[in-house]
Amino acid sequence: MHGMKEIIQEAESLPIEERAIVVDSLLRSLNPISTEIDIEWIKVAKRRLAELRSGSVKAVPGADVFAKIKERFEK
């Protein structure tokens, strides 16, 4: 059996796409999937996408969001 350091070194040598899969798998093992929660998030995402497409809400650029957060916490 591999030790933790060896496993990390081996994972780091993988292509980025495969590392992302490894990370996702590990995170899912810490926080098991809840079908009910996933269904609710899908509903929210679909509703928000519909709002964006209809023009009833406007998207805020990520840079603006992070600038406001930075400003808020620098006070």
Image (cartoon, grey):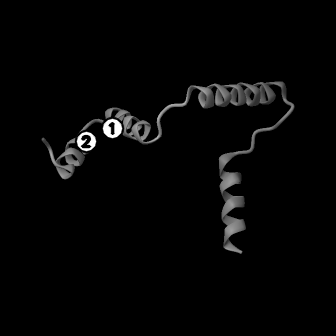
Q: Is residue 74 above or below residue 61?
A: below
Residue that sits furthest to the left in the current view: 1
How far across and down, in percent of the image, does residue 11 sit? 25, 41
Question: Are the residues tagged 2 and 1 within 8 Å (C-beta)?
Answer: yes
Asked which secondary structure carries label 2, the reply is helix
Identify the residue shown where x is 43% and y is 36%.
Answer: 28
Q: Is residue 20 above or below residue 40?
A: below
Q: Is residue 74 above or below residue 12?
A: below
If you read the primary sequence from the N terminus, does the residue marked by circle 2 or circle 1 appear first? 2
Identify the residue shown where x is 69% and y is 29%.
Answer: 45
Identify the residue shown where x is 83% and y is 25%.
Answer: 54
Asked if residue 49 lies left or right of residue 20, the reply is right
Q: Quadrant of residue 72?
A: bottom right
* Residue underneath mark 1: 19
How far across and down, in percent of the image, does residue 46 sit? 71, 25
| Label 1 CA crowd tier, 10 Å (few <14, some 14–19, many 20+) | some
The residue lying toward the viewer, choosing from 28 and 68, is: 28
The residue lying toward the viewer, choosing from 43 and 1, is: 1
| Label 2 CA crowd tier, 10 Å (few <14, some 14–19, many 20+) | some
The residue lying toward the viewer, choosing from 58 and 6, is: 6
How far across and down, in percent of the image, does residue 24 sit? 41, 36
